[in-house]
Amino acid sequence: MNESGQPVPSGELRVSDQDRDTILNVLGEHAAAGRLTLDELEDRAARALAAKTRGDLDTLTRDLPGAPGAPQAVAPQTTASRRAPIRWMVAIMGGSQRRGRFRLASSVNVVDFMGGDEIDLRDAEMEGSETTLNIVSVMGGAQVYLPHTVDVEIGGISIMGGNQERGVISRPRPGAPLIRIRAYNLMGGLTIWRLPPEARGLSLKESRRLAKAAERGRLPALE
């Protein structure tokens, strides 16, 4: 009941941490099914963690199968109808750029020989909650772009080269997808760009600019 004695509309009911965790699990399942990209997942997860009412949470799943009022779920996708997962990315004496919506296999091999790869994972789909990137750079390098709330684990070996992280360096959100990066550099290197929410939908050039601004604590205000 509210102060006037009337029942509180269901959408205005306050939510608990358990309610938020339930929605986070649902969003993760839909992301694994290919309905949400990595960036969409992290955007909705941030809004779920900040949600105060039932209505706030309902908006996050309203367009997903199984939600009240949403279209009924279609039959599970067959192997033939789903996007084929990417397993290899190769740049030899040149450069390549992987952007847009694509599906990552659980393990992806990236080879840069006297060349470089730009890998934007923001619009990528993941097969599960974890993906491993095995990156080999010989006189070349790779740049990986992802939301700053994603969990990143870096390992490997560098000889006359190295790895660096740029942008927003912060703790990943609880339950965030894990990107394992195994980087093997010979006279080459890897740069991981941890992008702030303000970079969502922007070009790589503009995203790098905002990531650098975040390092200096000078991000522009969101409109």
Image (spheres, rainbow, N blue to C red):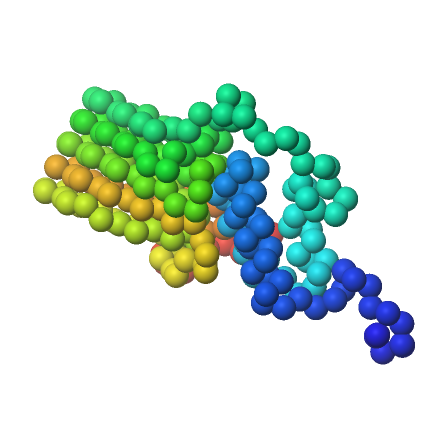
Q: Is residue 49 left or right of residue 99?
A: right
Q: Is residue 144 left or right of residue 221?
A: left
**Displayed quadrant of residue 73:** top right
**Displayed quadrant of residue 128:** top left
Looking at the image, which residue sits at the far left? 160
Q: Is residue 194 visible?
A: no
Q: Is residue 180 visible?
A: yes
**Residue nearest the viewer, comparing 190 with 42:** 42
**Residue nearest the viewer, comparing 188 with 216:** 188
**Displayed quadrant of residue 24:** bottom right
Q: Position of residue 169 (x, y in %)?
A: 36, 57
Going 46% across and 30% down the picture, which residue do you hit? 102
Q: How many marks?
A: 0
Relative vertical location of residue 117 with respect to residue 173 in this rendering, above or below: above
Going 26% across and 49% down the picture, which residue do you hit? 154
Going 79% across and 62% down the picture, which residue do you hit? 10
Q: Position of residue 156 (x, y in %)?
A: 19, 45
Q: Position of residue 139 (x, y in %)?
A: 15, 32
Going 54% across and 23% down the picture, which residue do you hit? 81
Q: Is residue 30 left or right of residue 137?
A: right
Q: Is residue 125 left or right of residue 3?
A: left
**Residue nearest the viewer, comparing 167 with 112:** 112
Instruction: Quadrant for the N terminus, please.
Output: bottom right
Q: Position of residue 22 (x, y in %)?
A: 59, 58
Relative vertical location of residue 135 with respect to residue 153 in this rendering, above or below: above
